[in-house]
Image (cartoon, rainbow, N blue to C red):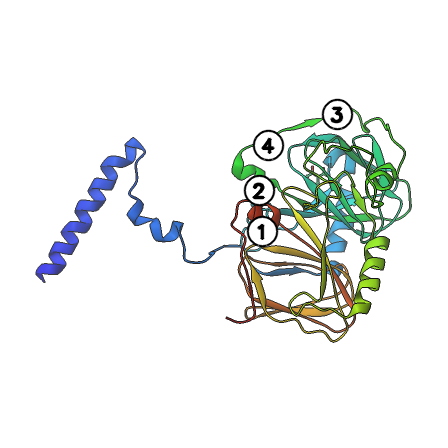
Amino acid sequence: MQTDTATKTTAEQRRAFYERMAPHHLAPLWEVLRGLITPEPRSDCRAALWRYDEVRPFLLESAEIISAREAERRVLVLENPGLPGQSRITTSLYAGLQLIMPGEVAPAHRHAQSALRFIVEGSGGFTAVDGEKTYMSPGDFVITPSWTWHDHGHEGEGPMIWLDGLDIPLVRALDCSFAEGYGEAAHPLTRPAGDSLARFGSGLLPVDYEPVSRTSPVFNYPYSRTREALEVMRRSKEWDPCHGLKVQYVNPASGDYAMPTIGAFMQLLPRGFGSEPYRSTDATVYSVVEGSGRTMIGEEILAWGPRDILVVPSWTRHWHQADTDAVLFSFSDRPVQKKLGLWREDRGNH
Ligand code: GTQ
């Protein structure tokens, strides 16, 4: 009884104390410490799947509502269900599906945020980055480095759709967003299409080349090359128990990730493959390129097919099953975590 009263009095005393300090912008750490420094990652980010056949009609309908030019970028944001209204697919990354119709333009602008495009549907669409156009095909991995002028257009037929991945929430957390419009639809072209890939992506570099940016000078990694590489590599049958056959996109001038803030990967899971459980601290967005299967995430089973998008939160054990040969593209903030010495992974069930 006495203890109860004493506790109550203590609690009241403490509350009164906190109220007196609040106007001075002071707060007691001991009331929040356990929620700040958690023994393991604790995130509102949830596992989720977007089925392409459910999303695509909404995306096409958006073209009846607004033009690419008026929208600036006509994109449906993939919002993590645990982070509604925040334009995030994970805590640190943004993703959306962008649509451009034949003859449309998404006008030139530049921003501090880095962007990747993973092409999902269509052909004849292009993106121009700092004066060089690249035409995009499904499975291509295309980069827009931080602060480079870029516009998108479409010279082909039918809808052109790609997955955008940007470091918007990360840049927001650091409060270093800058952006400007070019003022015209397109930035002038100064190099022929394909120049960067030939110059930097052929196992060659210009003699005495010194990197001018932290981002890869290759800005389109065509799927035809990536797929062919996986097909040749699979012959050695060296399967990683957690990843199948997995590669990461590289900046050929530095050997580092292709982008400073976003790591991008491609993996092949052979037909019938069941991966061992795996988790890592980088929440990961997957885009299914080929094949079908499922990913088990905690209690959830996410069944996927071509063009579906799924997200696996940080430090969440998951494993994949492939019903057919399957090819999965993925991206995460791994380069940032690794540079800061924060990244961890955990294989198996321990
Ligand atoms: O294409 O530049 O999905 O600036 C979001 C912001 C795409 C783009 C997005 C952007 C872009």
Residue 329: where, in percent of width, then height? 73, 56
Q: Position of residue 104 (x, y in %)?
A: 84, 37
Left or right position of 190 against 322: right
| Vertical order, 245 against 90 (above or below) | below
In the picture shown, does residue 210 fall above or below 161? Answer: above
Identify the residue under disc 4. 177
Q: CA distance from mark 2 to mark 1?
A: 9 Å
Which three-letter amino acid code belongs to the residue tagged 2?
Pro
The residue pinned by badge 2 equals 169
Marks 2,1: beta carbons within 8 A = yes
How many numbered discs?
A: 4
Regarding mark 4 in the picture, which secondary structure is present there? loop
Q: Is residue 72 left or right of residue 231?
A: left
Q: Sequence-wise, which precedes: disc 1 or disc 3?
A: 1
Residue lying at 29% horizontally and 36% vertically, measured from the top left: 22
Q: Amino acid at mark 4?
A: Ser
Residue behind mark 1: 90
Label 3 beta carbon less than 8 Å to ligand 1: no
User: Alpha carbon of mark 4 to alpha carbon of mark 2: how far?
Assistant: 10 Å
The residue nearer to you, when weighing 193 against 164, is 193
**Cβ atoms at labels 2 and 3 below 8 Å apart:** no
- Give the spatial CA distance, label 2 vs label 3: 24 Å
Tell me: residue 172, above or below residue 158.
above
- Tag 1 secondary structure: loop
